[in-house]
Amino acid sequence: MNDPSLQKSGDKRDGQEVYPNLLSVSFLIGKKLVILLSIALLIFFFLVPIGKLIYLSLMTKTGISFGYYTEIIQQTRTWRTLKDTFVIVMGSTLLSVFLGIITAWLMAYSDLKHKRALHLGLLLSFILPSYVLTLSWSSFMGSQGLMADLLQQFNSDAKPWSMYSYGGIIFVMGIHHFPLVYMLTVDVLKKIPRDMEWASRASGAGKVKCFFLITLPMALPGVAAGGLLAFLAGLDNFGIPAFLGIPVNISVLSTLIYEEIIGFGPSAFAKGASLSVMLGIFAVIGIILQWIAVHKNKNSDTVLMDENPRYELGKHRIWIGALLWSFLMLITVVPVFSMILTSLKKAYGLPFKLSNLTFSHYNYILFENPKVWQSIQNSLILSVTTLMICLILGTALAYFRVRHPSWYTRTAEIVIGIPFALPGIVFGLAMILTWMEPIPGWNPDIYGTVRILFIAYVCRFLILQVRASITAFMQIDVSMEEAAHISGANGWGKWIFVLLPLLLPGLLSGAFLVFLTALTELTVSALLWSSGSQTIGVTIFNYEQAGNTVYSTALSSLILALIMLGMAVLLVLQKAQKQKGVQS
Amino acid sequence: MSIELRQVSKKFGEYCALNSVDLTIADGEFVAVLGPSGCGKTTLLRLLAGFEQPTTGEIYMDQVQVAKKGFAIPPEKRKIGMVFQAFALWPHMNVMEHIRFPIRHHKETPGHIRKNEKDHISKILSMVGLSKFEKRMPHELSGGQKQRVALARAIAAEPALLLMDEPLSSLDAMLRMEMRREIQTLHRQTGTSVVYVTHDQGEALAMADRIVVMKNGSIEQVGSPEEIYRTPHTEFVAKFVSRANLAHGKWKDDVFVPNGCEDTLQWQGKHVASYFKSSGMFPVRPDQIQLAPAHKPGIQGEVVNVQFQGKDFHYHIQSHDGQWEIYSPLSFRLKEKVTLNLIETQ
C-alpha cells in the first residue's frame, strides 16, 4: 500500500481521480499476476501430486474403479500388514506417551538439577535420524554387541533380546518418538496455574490424587496432541521397520509400499498408489485429531509459562536424577557408542579388543569407494540447496502470512504443509507419479535424476522454514518495523539493518532444521534415488540390506559427527547473537 | 511543517475509526490530540505518519498533498519523526546507532547533519541527557532512558513534524512529570511541529499550544488548553477534560438558576457555551464549588464519600440534582449536610 510507484498520481493536486493512473493500474495488474502465478505454482507443486496419486490408484485397465483396492483387500498380506502396522504404531505410541508424561512431569514440576542439559539429552533420541538410532540399538543388542558381552559375564547361555522383532521395532520407535510427547506435554504442564493444584490439595486431595484428578486432565490436550504426533510419526517412519522388520518379514504400510514399488510388479505403481491412499487417509485422520487437540489448547496461549519447580523431591532427588540420566544414557549414548565400536572392528564378529580395532572401514568408505563419497556430496549439495531455497521462499511467505494475514496466505500455509504432513513414502510415490510425465506427452528428464530429489526436498521441507520464520516474525513487534520506516529506511535498509538482524536466530534455527532433516533423509530418497543420485541415508540403507554392517555403522557414525558439528556451530552462532543482546 | 486535513475519514471494514476530520496545524505548533481509547486519535496519528491511507479526504503537508483515497506517501518519504508507545527500540543496536540510523537512512536529512554526523549525534545525546550512554544496549537502559533514546531517534534527522503516540504511558508517575518538561524543552529547542496523542488530560493541558479533543472518530472541540478547560463546548469535553459536574436549571440570558433554588440563587454564566444554555445545563468544575455548613443559601446536599488528598478533600455530594464531585480544603464528615455555592471568580 505504500508503494512508491503510486506516488506519481499523488503529485497531482486535484482530489478527484477521474482517470485511473497508468502506473497504478499496471502495478495492480502486476500484483494480481504475482498472486495468480503463485496460486498456479502452489497447485502444481503441492496439490497435483496428491491428485495424481489418487487418480492412478483408481485408474484400472477397465477405467475408473476401485479394482486395485478390492484386489489389495483380498490379499492376506495386506491384512497382516495392517494388523502389524496397528500393533507397532499403537505400541510405540503408548510407550512414547508413557515416557513422555513421566519425563515432562519431572522436567516441569520437580526440582531436578541441570534441567537445561537434561532437556537437550531428552531431545537427543529424536534428533538422531531413526536409522542411526536403529543401527545403534541393533549393534548394541546384537549377538556381538555390548549387551551380549555384559550378559556373558553372568551366564554364558544368556543372549540379548533380538531387536529384529515386533518388540524391537516398537521399542526403538517408542524411544525415538517420546520426545514429541515430552515437548508438547511439558509446555502444557508449565502453563497450568499452580493454584489449581493448591486448590485441590486444600480440598483434601493427596499428591497422587491431585495428579490424576487435576494435573493429568488439565494436561490432556497436550498429551493427546503429543501422542497423536507420535502416532503420525510412527505411521510415517520408514527407517525403523525397514531396518528391523524387512529382514524378518515384518511389514508395516510404509515398508509394504516400498517393497511393492521396488519389486516392480506388473501393477506396482497402481497397487502402491492404492496402499498409499489408504496410508494417507489414516494420516489425515490423525492430523485432524491432532489439530483438534492442539486447538482445544488455544485458550492457554496467553498464560505464561511457570518455570519454577513445584515439587521438592528432597532426599529422592539424587537417585531420581541419577535414574533419569542413566535412562537417557542407556537409550542413546550407550547404543551409539556400541555402534561406533562395531564400525571400528576389523571384522564383524571379532570380540572387542584394542588389537581388533581399525579405521580401515572409514578409510574405505571415504577414500576407496567413490560411491560413498558421491552420496555424501549429493546429500550435502541437496541439503544446502534445499536450505537456501526454503530460507528465501519460506521467509517471504512467513512475512506475508504474519504482516498481511488473509485467507490466501492461510490457505497457502496449509497447502505447503501437506507434503510434510503426509507419510514420506506416500509423498515420494506421489512425486514419482507426477514427475515421470508432468504434462501428458512431456518427459522433462526429472524422474531418474537428482532433480526430482531437489523438488521433493524443497516441497517437503519448505513448511519447516515457514513455521520457524513465522515464529521469528511474530516475536518482532510491528512498531520495530514502523520505527525503521519513520527513520527513513525503505525496503532494503529496513531488511538489512533492522529486520534481518532481529530475525536471524529464528531463521537460522529453522534453516538448520531443514538442513539436518534433508541431510539425513531416507524415506523419500529411498523411493526417488537412482544410480548417481544416492544420498547418505540410501547408502547406509543399502549397506545394511547387503549385510555390510561395518560399513553402515561407519557411515552412520560419520553422519553423527556431522550432526554434532552442525549443532555446535548453531549453538555458537546463537550464543554470539545473544551476546549482541538480540534475544533479551 | 504546516499540516492540513480535509474531510479525512478512515474505515476499517464497517468500523469507522475517523469521521470527516478537518484540522489545520501551524508550523512549529504543539498540538495534543486528546481522547479516550478508541476515539480515533491513534488512527489520526497513523494517517499523519503514512502507515494508513484515508478512506476519503486529503492530507496536505506544507501545501503538498501527501495522502488521499487509496494513496499515501510512505512514512520514510515524509519529513517526520515518531515516538512509539512502547518505544520500539531495536534490541540489536546501541544508543548511538539508534540516533545514527535516521541520519543515514532519511533522504531528507539536511546536508550539514550528514557532514557532521558525529558532532550532531553528540549534540542530540546531550540534548536528551544521554551523553554517557552512547554504547549502551536497550536492555541495559531504564524506562526513562529508553524514552529518551526514542525521542533522540525521532528528532535526529531534524524532522519537520514530530509524532508522539502516548509516549509517557509506559513510564511511572514521577518520570512522567520529568519527561513532560523535557519534551517541552525539546519542542522549544527544535521548533518542529508536534502532534502528541494522549488520553491523559493533564499531559495535554500542560504541554500543548492547542488541544484537539476527540470522541468516536470525530473532533469535539479544538482550542487552547485554557479555552478547553474553562469553556468546554460539549458535555463530553466538560466531563472528560475538566471533570465538570452538570447542574440542571433554567437560563435567562446569561443568568443560570439551578433547579429547586428558583428564588434564592443566580449564577452568572457569560462564558458558558451555547450548547449548555440551550439544554438547561451549567458545567461546574469540582474546584468551582464552595462548601459551607448546612442550611445556608445555596444547593443543599449530603456528603456520601470523602477522600483526603493532601492539599484538599475530594467529596462526592448527593443533592436533589444528582451526585457532585467537589474539591474543597474544608473538612466535612461523611453523611454531614452541606451547602453548595458557585465561586464567582471568572
Image (cartoon, coloured by chain):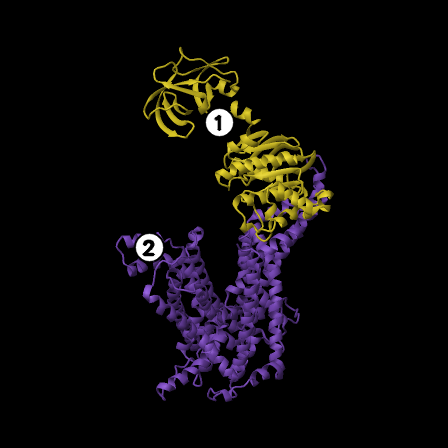
Chain colours: A purple, B yellow
Q: Give the amino acid at mark 2.
A: Glu
In the depicted view, which residue is nearer to us: A153 or A459?
Answer: A153
Are discs 2 and 1 less than 8 Å apart at CB? no
Answer whether residue B17 is visible to the viewer in this image: no
In the depicted view, which residue is nearer to us: B271 or A22?
Answer: B271
Instruction: Give the structural element (helix, strand or loop) at label 2.
Output: helix
The image shows residue A184 at horizontal and vertical percentages of 43, 61
On the image, numbered disc 2 is attached to which residue? A197
Tell me: residue B14, above or below residue A149: above
- How many discs appear? 2
Q: Are marks 2 and 1 on the same chain?
A: no
Q: Residue furthest left?
A: A204
B2 lies left or right of A362: right
Which chain does tag 1 point to?
B
On the image, numbered disc 1 is attached to which residue? B242
The image shows residue B336 at horizontal and vertical percentages of 32, 22
Which chain does tag 2 point to?
A
- The residue located at (56%, 84%) in the rendering is A359
Answer whether residue B150 is visible to the viewer in this image: yes
The image shows residue B17 at horizontal and vertical percentages of 54, 37
Q: Depth-wise, is mark 2 or mark 1 nearer the camera?
A: 1
Q: Give the amino acid at mark 1.
A: Ser
Give the position of the N terminus of chain A as an image quadrant. Answer: top right
Circle 1 residues within 10 Å: few <14, some 14–19, many ≥20: many
Q: Quadrant of residue A387?
A: bottom right
Circle 2 residues within 10 Å: few <14, some 14–19, many ≥20: some
* CA separation in Å, label 2 and label 1: 49 Å
B344 lies left or right of A200: right
